[in-house]
Image (tube, rainbow, N blue to C red):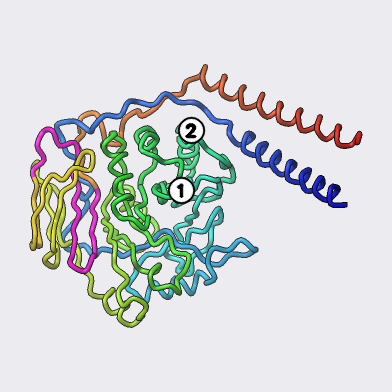
Amino acid sequence: MIYSILRSLWRAFLSLVVVVVVAILATSVSPIYDFAPAEPFSGADIFNPYADFSSDMEWKRSSLHTHTRVEGPLNECDFSAEEVWRKYQDFGYDIVGISNHNEITPHPATKQDIRIYEHGYNLRNFHKLVIGTESVMRFDALYPLFASQAQWQLDMLAGRCAVLQLNHPSRSALLDSTKLSKIAGYDIMELSGFNAYLENLHWDWALSAGRYSFALLNDDLHYPDRSGRFAVRCGFIGAESCATEDIIRALKSGCFYSMRLPDYGAGDWEVKRERNMMLPAVENIGLRGDTIFIKLSSSAEQIRVIGQNHTLLGRVADCDSMGYRLCDKDSYARFVVSYPDSLIIMTNAFARYDRATMSSPADRVYYTPNTLATVLYNIMVVLLLVLVLVVYVKIIKRWRRR
């Protein structure tokens, strides 16, 4: 009896393994690309992501990566979209993106119905925020291993949306420094990991390789009832209004900055709400000649300028403003502002490029298809798939003869 039970369990386990392997192989088809080598930004001009900023602009506080309750058993949040939206509003947020996995959830505020979803159910946490889209792309590589697989997915998604964000790279086993120095085609890198240094490091890996993107902090909210998970990471978007077209225009141009906040009150929601209404802000930011500058609403403990390979380029202390002149060897520079209570402000990067031939530092060819490698790779995938199925069928026939 025990032997029979163990044999049945073994057969069930083997069948499950075969199903998983087949699913992985069947979704592993992909073009193969030759990626351009990593090289710093260069050129006589400096790209200013805040070119559309004006000093009388009102920043719109945002969190675009937000989960809510959905129909069915696979829920990542116990609260409705209406409940989450109202709570964010109570804490001074203007823009909230409802971005459930592989599902477009209608927004409670019709003027902000941006149509966002989080793409990806693979086993390596390679997730993307698809912003401004009409439909959900169901295909996903179950276990992506190669940069080419990641690039193909980014290309397919980018063609179906207005803005594409690479989600939480520090939590994805796929996105190491090697792959981030190759892939491109996303507009924003999300800085939503629990370790601020590591998340910034991933962004600098890509920037230092000449792969330009903006960066944005979001709560990636799953638990609006937990103080330490709510209103701790946000963006401030320089949009004329909260209408969808204005939000997307600002996201595409880079006119926004990010903020990481401490958990004010540590569970005392009244204290948390009060402190969230008293945040510092960027009053002015931009480029004059070859000097980048920032002006804050209140004095910061420290303002730093970070550049190529996460290098510290400049720093001032106990000040509400800073200017930094980019020298010829500076490929890019970005501001990081720190306050005594651990609040951090991060700006988008100013980067070198050639205005005569490019519209932005991202306007270059990062990869080209390799036809021969594509054919050989996909033939190999198909052969492996056939081999697994043939071996499994033989095993099944042997079981039946016993």
Percent x, y for residue 56? 17, 63
At x 48% / y 74%, what residue is drawn?
83
Residue to which mark 2 is pinned: 146
- State left or right for residue 21 relative to residue 311: right
Check disc 1: other Cα within 10 Å, few if <14, some if 14-19, many if 20+: many
Name above or below for residue 210 compared with residue 373: below
**Residue type for callout 2:** Phe
Seen as rendered, the residue at the extreme front is 2
Q: Is residue 239 visible?
A: no
Percent x, y for residue 138? 59, 46
State which tag comes first along the sequence, 2 or 1. Answer: 1
- State left or right for residue 52 relative to residue 114: left
Quadrant of residue 28 within the rendered picture: top right
Seen as rendered, the residue at the extreme right is 401
Percent x, y for residue 238? 26, 58
At x 46% / y 50%, what residue is drawn?
130
Check disc 2: other Cα within 10 Å, few if <14, some if 14-19, many if 20+: some
Question: How far apart are the alpha carbons under marks 2 and 1?
Answer: 16 Å
Question: Which residue occupies the foreground of this view, 270 or 10?
Answer: 10
**Residue type for callout 1:** Lys
Q: Quadrant of the C terminus?
A: top right
Residue range in magenta is 325-348
At x 58% / y 42%, what residue is drawn?
142
What is the count of numbered marks?
2
Q: Secondary structure at mark 2?
A: loop
Question: Which residue occupies the foreground of this view, 288 or 29?
Answer: 29
Percent x, y for residue 94? 34, 68
Residue to which mark 1 is pinned: 128
Q: Secondary structure at mark 1?
A: strand
Question: Which residue occupies the foreground of this view, 216 or 191?
Answer: 191
The answer to whether residue 330 is magenta is yes
